[in-house]
Image: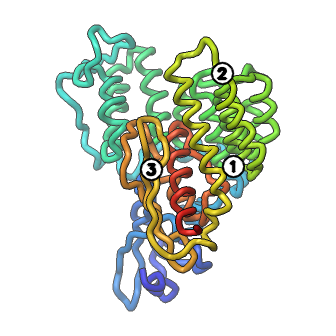
Amino acid sequence: MKRLFLFMLAATLANADTIEMMTGAKVEGKVVENNATAKTLTVEFYLGGKLLQRILPYANIKAITVNGVRTDLNAPASATTRTPAEVQALIAKVGPTEPDWFKSTNLNFPKTLDLSWPSKPTSGWSNQKNAGQFIWDIINPNASRWREGIKFVTHLMELNKDDASVRKRATNEIANMHFRFFQDYARAAWWWQKAGITIEDAPGFHLAECYWRLGSRQMALDFMNGTKLVYLDGIKLLGDMGETDRAVKMAEYYDDQDAWLLAGDACRLAGRLAEAQAFYEKVINTPAAGQNPNRVKRTTGRAQANLAAIKLFELADVSKVADGSYKDSSLGYEGQVEVSVKVRGKKIEDVKITQHKEKQYYSSMTDVPAQIIAKQGVKGVDATSRATITGEAIINATAKALAQGAR
């Protein structure tokens, strides 16, 4: 990228977009593609009278302004502030539109699928017959097929437009996909609103998160208030929003392993490491009677992995790490997640996931490494919604890897 190709010399394109670099430079060009999956922008600009095209990682970009809408790519979600009316206007403007890749994406699914999409499959598990199982097994674990997934569910919705139950399920799944795969919060919110989702529905807290991510903390909190909270989702979102005291209070009220684990995560994100350590130790040291043994084992394992990593957070200060590449791993949902961290000039240059067995990882494989690079460390990095366990594993493995170079 050599001095960002001297972008400051680039001539302005017609209807130019603005790309604000992490260096402070501003580039006038055209955003050809915003690939949220790969965390890259494809931009065009003029240099020396020639039209050039380059792909830039999010880690190098502070913000972009496209069609008058400014989006921070590396700042915390709370850094963008909008009124509830502005958020709703943004949702109404962007939500009903198709993504720029939609028309060029192929409709790709097995011809053996039952496109009536019954809520209860008539036979056993078969991702070649049941549409929901095809989405779970084939679409969700394969990032290269995420666009096809939205195209496919849109097709199901159109085919079953006279079946209210299928139409609502498809509407909800399209919202889920925009949220999980692409962090396209405006489109996700629009589809969930269209489905009539409330805070008491399963995706309710994700709709609240959309409001927050789009810039209105108050809109999110108002949506959550005065209702019966689904406590695990509530603790997670409040922690991510920086409402740490409220997250801890909710965890203490419900008083079980899952709640303590999420309270520890909220405290860790806020930099309250001693409190986080105490919650993780409580998970490990308190017997969980009457619960599924496999779930207890997984929850305890997560707490142990988080506790081990948290003790390395100070060693994971990149300013104390020697230049080089470091590898380590931590427990994910399906097994160990291994990362490779490259440090040069006392800066984290790259974070790559080198081995994993995760399946429902959604955007965590790109989002969490991008956060780590942007923040130049593991402190204050939040695990991606709907892939929390995988995100935690990436954070923990990075902390362990960085600590190697500081020893």
The mark nearer the N terminus, 3 or 2, is 2
Q: CA distance from mark 1 to mark 3?
A: 19 Å
On the image, which quarter does residue 263 sit in?
top right
Q: Residues within 10 Å of mark 2 (few under 14, many from 20)?
A: few
Instruction: Report the residue at 68% width, 29% height from top.
Output: 285
| Secondary structure beneath label 2 | loop
Q: Amino acid at mark 1?
A: Leu
Residue that lies at the very extreme toward the top in this rendered image: 122
The answer, for residue 65, to whether it is visible in the render is: no
Q: Which residue is mark 1?
A: 269
Of residue 237 and residue 225, the one placed in the foreground of this image is 237
The mark nearer the N terminus, 2 or 1, is 1
Instruction: Report the residue at 62% width, 72% height from top.
Output: 320
| Secondary structure beneath label 3 | helix
Q: How is the image coloured?
A: rainbow
**Image depth: mark 3 or mark 2 in front:** 2
Q: Which residue is mark 3?
A: 365
On the image, which quarter does residue 318 sit in?
bottom right
Q: Residues within 10 Å of mark 1 (few under 14, many from 20)?
A: many
Q: Amino acid at mark 3?
A: Met
Residue 277 image position (x, y, % from top left): 72, 43
Q: CA distance from mark 2 to mark 1?
A: 26 Å
